[in-house]
Image (spheres, helix red, strand yellow):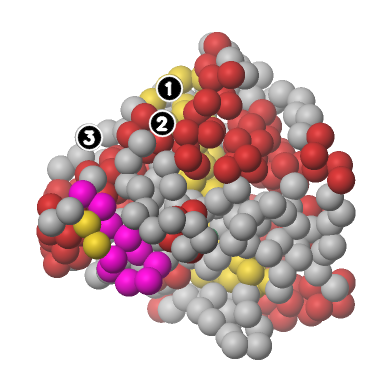
């Protein structure tokens, strides 16, 4: 395997944008340690000695690039609060004096991850960036996210590089990417698929019948699940998506790579292990090879287990490099619970019937 893998990283992501509120405050989980642990682990394993890996620094962008995805008001608000020394935007969003610049760098990192693939510099890429982006809306920050890194990078491809081809987003973060889904809800050139933990009793956004609108109808696909998703069920969900992906035939696949479904994550309530992430990546690579010359970009979203993140990253990078992967020893003591099979099947069948008018592969 001689495919090149681009890793987007910058030391600032491991140093800046620190919550002034100590744990157990929810917002403190989004910390520089998330990236620091991954970088140090990769260095310790001499990952970068592999000549198939290309280290990529985030593209330096001006504020006009942010305007592709956000209102001037939102951009100015973040800049102003950063200049004032920081503050809380709502209970789930904190801003520090360096947040504006770091969030801008995160957008630049996502842009570079996609650009390096489109320009054929690499075949795969993984952007280890923060703050995360998939909850950010055009008009406001939300859920630990300042700017929408993936939406902004796609809009950059569209507006600045005249890249008009179809893109599929697979959002595997434990939470529904409400901001990201909104950008492309009526856009048939972007397929958004999200699997996420969902509160079926209270309901929430990210439900089964949010299918998109207008020309984008059928191209917003939510697979909401109750807690305890297992590795096997995670792969089954990808198995559900694969025929749709083949029919959609995108030119590029972006994975909104949140790792808060990892069993040891302090926020998510699912049961995935590194083996699940490894096998998911392998299966996805096979489909990508068939439909889009293997082009996949992983963009980091959530994931708050500091020890888990480095192993999850290792699992995915090892798969992309076509290497064997050995799960960490401590995972052997974990028993995966899994979602009740009947409940799981009911969700899948309901989604299938909702989508069948829009996809030939789902017609009975
Ligand atoms: Zn999340």
**Ligand 1 contact, mark 1 (Cβ < 8 Å):** no
Q: Is residue 304 left or right of residue 92?
A: right
Q: Is residue 242 visible?
A: no
Which mark is first along the chain, 3 or 2?
Answer: 2
> Mark 1 falls on what kind of element?
strand
Q: Residue furthest bottom?
A: 201
Contact between marks 1 and 2 (CB within 8 A): the answer is: yes
Residue 206 occupies which quadrant of the picture?
Answer: bottom right
Element on which disc 2 rests: loop
Is 90 within the magenta? yes
Q: Earlier in the sequence, mark 3 or mark 1?
A: 1
In percent of the image, x 66 and y 36: which residue is there?
311
Classify the position of the N terminus by image quarter: top right
Q: Which residue is mark 1?
A: 55
Q: Does 133 sit left or right of 206 as displayed?
A: left
Q: Depth-wise, is mark 2 or mark 3 nearer the camera?
A: 2
What range is drawn magenta here? 88-97
Residue 261 percent across, percent down from the top left = 65, 57
The C terminus sits in image quarter: bottom right
């Amino acid at each position: 395997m001689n495919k090149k893998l681009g890793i987007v990283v910058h030391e600032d992501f491991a140093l800046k944008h620190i919550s002034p509120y100590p744990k157990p405050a929810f917002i403190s989980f989004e910390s520089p340690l998330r990236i620091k642990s991954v970088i140090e682990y990769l260095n310790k394993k001499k990952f970068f000695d592999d000549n198939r890996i290309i280290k990529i620094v985030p593209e330096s962008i001006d504020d006009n690039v942010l305007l592709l995805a956000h209102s001037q008001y939102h951009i100015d608000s973040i800049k102003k609060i950063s200049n004032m020394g920081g503050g809380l935007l709502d209970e789930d969003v904190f801003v520090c004096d360096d947040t504006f610049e770091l969030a801008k760098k995160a957008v630049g990192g996502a842009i570079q991850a996609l650009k390096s693939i489109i320009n054929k510099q690499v075949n795969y890429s993984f952007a280890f960036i923060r703050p995360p982006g998939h909850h950010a809306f055009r008009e406001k920050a939300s859920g630990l996210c300042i700017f929408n890194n993936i939406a902004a990078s796609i809009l950059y491809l569209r507006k600045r590089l005249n890249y008009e081809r179809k893109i599929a987003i697979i959002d595997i973060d434990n939470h529904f990417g409400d901001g990201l889904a909104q950008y492309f809800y009526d856009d048939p050139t972007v397929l958004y698929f999200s699997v996420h933990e969902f509160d079926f009793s209270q309901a929430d956004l990210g439900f089964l019948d949010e299918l998109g609108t207008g020309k984008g109808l059928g191209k917003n696909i939510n697979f909401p699940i109750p807690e305890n998703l297992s590795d096997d069920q995670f792969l089954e969900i990808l198995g559900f998506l694969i025929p749709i992906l083949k029919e959609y035939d995108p030119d590029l696949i972006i994975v909104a790579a949140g790792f808060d479904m990892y069993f040891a994550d302090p926020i998510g309530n699912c049961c995935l292990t590194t083996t699940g992430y490894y096998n998911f990546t392998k299966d996805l690579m096979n489909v990508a090879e068939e439909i889009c010359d293997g082009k996949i970009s992983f963009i980091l979203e959530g994931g708050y287990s500091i020890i888990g993140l480095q192993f999850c990253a290792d699992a995915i990078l090892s798969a992309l490099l076509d290497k064997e992967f050995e799960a960490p020893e401590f995972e052997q003591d974990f028993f995966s619970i899994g979602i009740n099979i009947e409940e799981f099947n009911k969700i899948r069948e309901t989604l299938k019937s909702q989508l069948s008018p829009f996809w030939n592969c789902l017609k009975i």
